[in-house]
């Protein structure tokens, strides 16, 4: 997997939806780039439903927590959006299933 962050944005203003698709490696530093893209998309139309699809990206745990926090509060970090405009953001992440312990062999 490429570690470079790649972002594609799809916007449907008629239906008030935008999708930000990110691939590559999302770290606590590169997550700020996603916030900036989300802010720009959010500024196109009030009440826009924004989906952040990171299901094909490698996401550091701390960066994922940061994205979920923005989703929960419905606001982007103040350093990115000082006006704190409402931002309805949903995060579509790859589901991770816990690894099961290997079965022990009978001796």
Image (tube, helix red, strand yellow):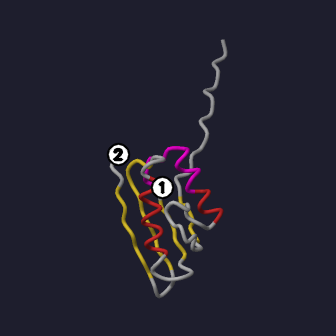
Picture coordinates of residue 41, whole percent (x, y): 44, 73
Q: Viewer-proximal residue, 18 or 67?
A: 67
Is residue 66 depicted above or below 60 in this figure?
A: below
- Which structural element holds mark 1? loop
Is residue 45 depicted above or below 30 in this figure?
A: below
In the rendered image, residue 20 lying in the magenta stretch gets the answer no
Q: Earlier in the sequence, mark 2 or mark 1?
A: 2
Residues at marks 2 and 1, CA–CA distance in whole angstroms: 15 Å
Q: Write the residue at 51% across / 67% down.
A: 81
Classed neighbour count for the residue bearing mark 2: other residues with Cα under 10 Å, few (<14), some (14–19), many (≥20) = few
Q: How many marks?
A: 2
Picture coordinates of residue 51, whole percent (x, y): 51, 68
Q: Which residue is mark 1?
A: 55
- Which structural element holds mark 2? loop
Q: Write the residue at 47% across / 77% down.
A: 43
On screen, residue 106 versus residue 76, left or right, reads right
Q: Viewer-proximal residue, 23 or 80?
A: 80
Classed neighbour count for the residue bearing mark 1: other residues with Cα under 10 Å, few (<14), some (14–19), many (≥20) = some
Is residue 100 depicted above or below 97 in this figure?
A: above
Residue 3's mark? 2
Q: Write the residue at 47% across / 57% down.
A: 54
In the rendered image, residue 57 lying in the magenta stretch gets the answer yes
Magenta segment boundaries in residue numbering: 56-67
Work out which residue is located at the far top of the displayed protein and give it.
107
Q: Quadrant of residue 75?
A: bottom right
Which quadrant is the N terminus positioned in?
top left
Q: Quadrant of residue 40?
A: bottom left
On screen, residue 71 versus residue 23, left or right, reads right
């Amino acid at each position: 997997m490429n570690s470079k962050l790649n972002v594609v944005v799809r916007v449907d203003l008629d239906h008030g939806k935008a999708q930000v698709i990110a691939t590559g490696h999302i770290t606590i530093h590169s997550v700020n780039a996603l916030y900036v893209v989300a802010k720009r998309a959010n500024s196109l139309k009030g009440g826009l439903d924004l989906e952040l699809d990171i299901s094909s990206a490698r996401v550091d745990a701390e960066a994922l927590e940061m994205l979920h926090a923005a989703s929960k509060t419905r606001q982007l970090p103040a350093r990115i959006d000082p006006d704190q405009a409402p931002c309805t953001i949903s995060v579509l992440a790859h589901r991770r299933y816990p690894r099961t312990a290997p079965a022990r062999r009978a001796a």
